[in-house]
Amino acid sequence: MNLKALTSTEILGYSFLILLYILGIYFANTDPSYFKSTYAREDGFIEYATAVMLLYISVLCFSRLFNLWSVKSALWRLGVLGFAILFLFGAGEEISWGQRIFGIESSDYFIENNAQQETNLHNMVVGETKINKLIFSQILTIVLVIYLILLPILYRKFKNIKNLVDMFAVPLPRWNHTIAFLLVTGLLIFIPSDKKWEVYELAFGIIFLLIFLNPFNKFIYNKNER
């Protein structure tokens, strides 16, 4: 990773990631109870920080959509709107749409069909299949490999793919984003707790925010680029 090529925001983001993992690895190995009940607990700092990161991406997309609406193509608008809605949904799901914040009771349907009896979709259980495990673990893993590893290679190699990515305003990860994601994924082996996924989700939020702030194809947000 070329440190000289990093923006000040990326340096700040990666510094926070390093601190997040140092503390996470330390507490998970020296005081598992503290790690689970305090550091990575439900409704704790890490969970709310993840929601904030995802919400920030959504607001950023809506802002770009509003500011560039009149000068961009319909497909560009569709792409940016799609990302805005996707990350808004992710932020809402992360905190169960404010259910615990506002003390809202779950309906009978969610009590019966949600693994945590919360008002969200990612903890739903269909038959014996957990949606969280199917979509947010297996399918999302495939999507991330394609997006973070394969797409940057294909984008640089094939003009048709480059044009398609830019047309729909898909922010392309820089290699430092890809390397960071691979590192935070690999470091999970040093966190022997089932709550490590809370830390990983925050890492996801931070890295994706950095991608959307400074993608390789940042020119897609220029006014003179359609």
Image (cartoon, grey):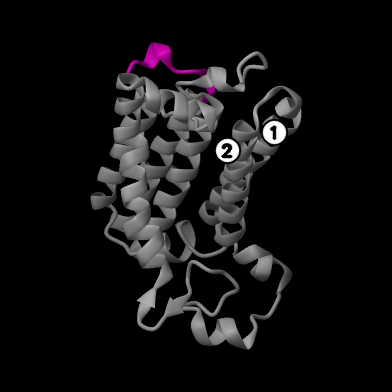
Label 1 sits on residue: 65
In this rendering, the label closer to the viewer, 2 or 1: 2
Query: Judging from the image, what secondary structure is the residue with disc 2 in?
Result: helix
Q: Residue drawn 40% across and 61% down?
A: 135
Is residue 6 found inside the magenta-colored segment of the image? yes
Q: Which mark is residue 9?
A: none
Give the Cα separation between the discs numbered 2 and 1.
10 Å
Q: Amino acid at mark 1?
A: Leu
What x and y, as percent, mark residue 27?
A: 36, 54
What x and y, as percent, mark residue 91?
A: 59, 53
Q: Which mark is residue 79?
A: 2
Q: Earlier in the sequence, mark 2 or mark 1?
A: 1
Query: Judging from the image, what secondary structure is the residue with disc 1 in?
Result: helix
Which quadrant of the figure has residue 128? bottom left
Q: Amino acid at mark 2?
A: Gly
Q: Which contiguous range is marked in magenta?
A: 1-9
Which quadrant of the figure has residue 68? top right
Which quadrant of the figure has residue 182? top left
